[in-house]
Amino acid sequence: MGGDMSTGIQAGAGTAAARETRSVCPYCGTGCGVLIQHDGQRILGVRGDPDHPANFGRLCAKGRTLHQTVHGADRATRPLWRDRDSGGSSPLPWSEALQRAAEGFAGIIRAHGPQAVAFYVSGQLPTEDYYVANKLAKGFIGTNHIDTNSRLCMASAVSGYKSSLGMDSVPCAYEDIDLADCIFLIGSNTAYAHPIVFRRIEDAKASNPDLRIIVADPRRTPTASIADLYLPLKPGTDVALLHGILHILIWEGWIDRAFIDAHTEGWEALKALVQDYSPQTVAEACAITVADLRRAAELFGTARAALSLWCQGLNQSAHGTDKNTALINLHLATGQIGKPGAGPFSLTGQPNAMGGREVGGMPALLPGHRDVLNPAHREEIASFWGVEGISPEPGLTAVPLFQAMERGEIKAVWIVCTNPVLSMPDQAQVIRALARAELVILQDAYLETETGAYADLLLPAASWGEREAVVTNSERRISHLGQAIPAPGAALPDWEIFRDFAHALGAALDESGRPAPASMDGSWTARAQRLFAFSTAESVFNEYRETTRGRDLDITGLSFARLDRDGPQQWPFPEGAQKGRARLYGDGVFPTPSGRARFRAPAYAPVAEDIDARYPLRLITGRLRDQWHSMSRTGKVTALFQHSEEPLLEIHPRDAQRLGLKDGQLCRVSSRRGKVVVRAQVLATATPGVLFLPMHFGARFAPAGECNRLTLPAIDPVSGEPEFKHTAVRVEPLAFAWTGAILALLDGEAQFLAARAVAQGFPYASLARIGGAMQNGFLLRLAAEEAPPAWAVQEWDRALGIGGADALDYQDLRRGVSKRICVREGRLVAARLFGETETLDWLRALLLAGTDIQPYRHALFAPTVPQQLSAWVPPHTVCTCLGVSETVICAAIAQGAKSVEAVAQVCGAGSECGSCRPEISALLRAPVQEAS
Ligand code: SF4
């Protein structure tokens, strides 16, 4: 199914006739099938693949706009060498780039040994890339220091599954959502992080009136809109909650004693432990009611089929493994596993985090679900690769790896398809580490990530749609991604770069005089040529496939041709099989030495950094609905800014009132490690004492709003996953003496980049794309303690193209106000409002609507919006696909629409990708709105 379908369909109005190539969305682990519409050179559009079993044609707002992310001036198209002192970079041919990389690695390996080099890769890499990178590190160089940004999202699920069930294997399938009669969502804002999975839950709820849904989350997220029971537990208390539920299950006899006796071990120790987790004790620890706790236990314990879905809320914790095993305990105690509609189902954050685990792309893993610590596994893989051995020590996980780099122990790091300066906890530490490293190589499809500023060598990678590959989604389903168009410039698939580097490194190691492993090859050069003889992505896949033979994830029955013929398949799919297996452990046999699943009995432990008098509030970080990770892709799409333009600090009205903080006011959030300046969003649905900041915004969009300046490097001792879901912070309202804003229609991307340059250095700045069906532009908001000097303002006007014959100026030096409005052919095209910004929203509405401004000329420089014009102020956009505002939806509700479907019929909102349906549900539940 990865092939070019050459259907000759029209990609959309005004585009040339297009072919379609099957692929998968490169964002979340839902793994939605996508048909890429292209002309062989450019990607012109996308549509959901109606035949893909993950989404049956549906796509969320992010997936629907994928085609807008591919072509751009910021694509990396040739290798660049960056001068650390000047920050300037110069292009290199591939041969020279790889030689410099190889000489750098060889010199460090020669002087300090292979443990002085490391790789930090990504859950967005396809399986082939992961496999070759892992073989390069562990099989050729001899270092196990290869970790991945999947460490930041699902490592605790891996360790939980392995600890409880014996293997890192998700036992469920998406079809279990349709078959469950209790769904327990814990630590997952599915509505935002996995929107198409959430649509499936909505459908299940609509078609099965008996389905009961429990949502446990410290934040009342949009996911709670679907809950029959919402548990607003105190952050970090999940283990107590889960033990408390088990306590009640035992007390009420809602356990499956026969399953426990036949298929598990460790029950008595767990039973003894949870005796102490009485409903009263747990309700107090979790800050929920005893009645709600009992109700949760009843819904789960009396269900015919109970399915748990979880994500970062459980995983991103210093006790993430315990949280995972405590949840799996509930399934083992009730026999809710291995049958239709039941089981513990971890939702994978990234598109191929599962594939990375399969090929052993983590420091303690080897291909085919093998472990570095297992001598037999090391021997099997060493023998398969034809090398003398694998280093017996697991490598460092992400946080300790960057700490070792800061200490000077890791001297070279190769970062691939990820942006650790933005995404790792304790940002200042990561920056110190990269500054200390002797050689930093960054391999990415995009040039301007925050990490790029610390790289010595930038290598251009092919991206989505530009190379062939396979990925595995959350339900163990492998899809074949076709290549639609060539990669830009000299960009190459990641596996090809690793292969070519291995060949260059072989020569450099021989040159450096490092003794060659004589027994098999005679020289490093010969060894590299033997180990990395891959000619196609398929040749890599075929080699990896062999490592799965006889393992729990056996895919020896799969091939690119089979995936093309029969469509995406779940593993295991051994040779001779006709189809993959939807769910695992139906026979009650688990891949442990005894064949029994293991009850684990972790005691509840408090968060790593608790609140105190100096830092009295709890901060959670996480995802927004329409942005992805560090916005390298989604930051290009105007429509994806409509829902959230900047990082807003969600805060409860009671906390805001106590702090003297108003909705929309700027504030400083501080932790023991750093501070950010962001705008407050006072939300009645927020939990008192609990704050939320989105994870996406970095120096490119909100230079003072990077949430990982605050987060702590505490990690789970087993999984190594950081505690992103709890940081102790304090908040102080800010009143800057000067505020400013610039908005303009875009003549080109250079103008947006110029606005980005202006944003740097301000104590507060946020840059967003604005627009609609007709116009694209940018909005830059600024604040400082004093007005910028006149010469700087003149320079910015020039750089941003705000001036010339189109410009009208207003100055009030006494009040420090300086405004410029640009009008072209009677339409507003740009506005700079320095020192007075109250009319910003109104001017923005005029600009985006393309309105003839003649009737409003008298008010363009007014200090506030004249009363009779205030209806122009733009409302919040809820439906990104159709650009429908909250005001329009409230009007539909006021006119009698009583359901999401009815709202969709009246105004269209919610009828396309459906990502906004939870927000429409919340508006339906709110007090009746007046149409405005
Ligand atoms: Fe992509 Fe959205 Fe599907 Fe996730 S749910 S894979 S982001 S289309």
Image (tube, rainbow, N blue to C red):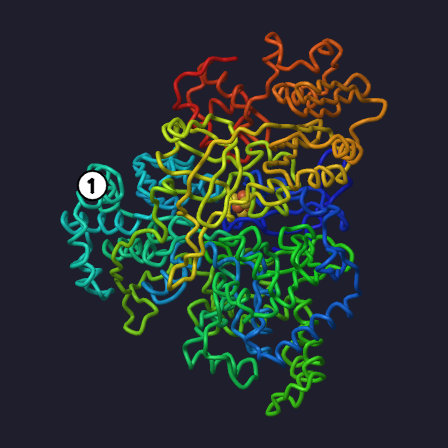
On the picture, is 602 further left or further right than 320?
left
Report x, y in % for residue 691.
42, 38
For the residue pair 314 and 99, the one nearer the viewer reads as 99
> In this picture, is 617 found above or below 783?
below
The disc labelled 1 sits on which kind of residue?
Arg
Report x, y in % for residue 99.
74, 73
**Residue in the picture at 35% in, 59% down:** 321
Q: Residue 3: tell me if it is visible.
A: no
Label 1 crowd (10 A; few <14 / some 14-19 / many >=20): some
For the residue pair 112 and 27, the one nearer the viewer reads as 112
Q: Residue 7: tell me if it is visible.
A: yes
Q: How many marks?
A: 1
Q: Quadrant of residue 507?
A: bottom right
> In this picture, is 791 found above or below 512?
above
Residue indicated by mark 1: 294
> In this picture, is 718 found above or below 734?
below
**The furthest residue to the front:** 814
Q: Quadrant of residue 68?
A: top right
Report x, y in % for residue 879.
55, 29
On the picture, is 303 further left or further right than 784?
left
For the residue pair 806 and 350, the one nearer the viewer reads as 806
Q: Considering the numbered disc 1 on the image, is that residue within a helix, a strand or a loop?
A: helix
Which quarter of the figure is the N terminus placed in?
bottom right
On the picture, is 41 further left or further right than 923?
right
> In this picture, is 354 found above or below 226?
below
For the residue pair 434 and 524, the one nearer the viewer reads as 434
Ligand 1 position by quadrant: top right
Report x, y in % for residue 12.
71, 36
**The furthest residue to the right:** 805
